Amino acid sequence: MVDTTRLTQAVDHFADRLRAAPQSRLQRGAAAEALALARELAQWAQVLEAPGGEPREMPDAGMFAAADQVTVAGHDLALVVTTDDEVGEAVRLVEEARKRAGV
């Protein structure tokens, strides 16, 4: 069993920063960046859970839901990754998205 603590901590940190961000920051792209990350993580989790299946796209639930979407997708991925390399790649994606979001 792989330790996914780094991943869940990175996801939770990004989500907390999004929740604390002013609406203007969310509107200027932070929410869109978060949704893009959530969609990527959710798709990755779906591929790992059901190889060969058709991944579903996470819907846009609005800028105020972006933090929750990142949390759900990140924690779902943490449940299905199987290697330390996958954890490291996921953490990298989260950190890069957080930086691009400016939070």
Image (cartoon, rainbow, N blue to C red):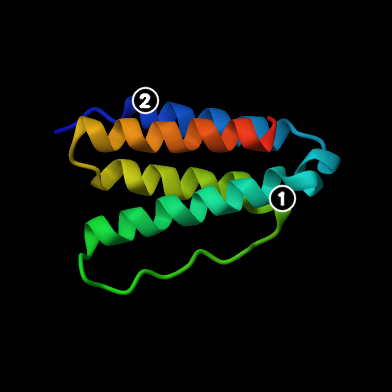
Residue 81 lies, in percent from the top left, at: 24, 43
CB of mark 2 within 8 Å of CB of mark 1? no
In the picture shown, does residue 39 fall above or below 23? below
Q: Local crowd at mark 2 within 10 Å, few (<14), some, or many (≥20)?
A: some
Residue 85 image position (x, y, % from top left): 24, 33
Q: Amino acid type of disc 1?
A: Phe
- Give the side of residue 70 with respect to residue 6, left or right: right
* Residue drawn where x is 57% and y is 66% of the image: 59
Callout 2: SS? helix
Placement of 84 over or under 53, stated as above or below: above
Q: Residue furthest left?
A: 1
Q: Which residue is mark 1?
A: 64
- Residue 103 got which mark? none
Looking at the image, residue 1 sits to the left or right of residue 19; the answer is left
Point out the image quarter for the N terminus. top left
Q: What residue is rendered at 63% in x and 47% in y?
A: 33
Q: Secondary structure at mark 1?
A: helix
Q: In the image, is residue 16 above or below residue 72?
A: above
Report which residue position mark 2 lands on. Answer: 6
Q: Earlier in the sequence, mark 2 or mark 1?
A: 2
Q: Residue at x 73, y 46 (%)?
A: 29
Q: How many numbered circles does the render carry?
A: 2
Q: Where the C terminus falls, by quadrant? A: top right
- Quadrant of the rendered image containing residue 49: bottom left
Q: Is residue 73 left or right of residue 30?
A: left
Q: Residue furthest bottom?
A: 54
Residue ID at (45%, 53%): 40
Give the residue type at disc 2.
Arg
Distance from Cα at disc 2 to Cα at disc 1: 25 Å
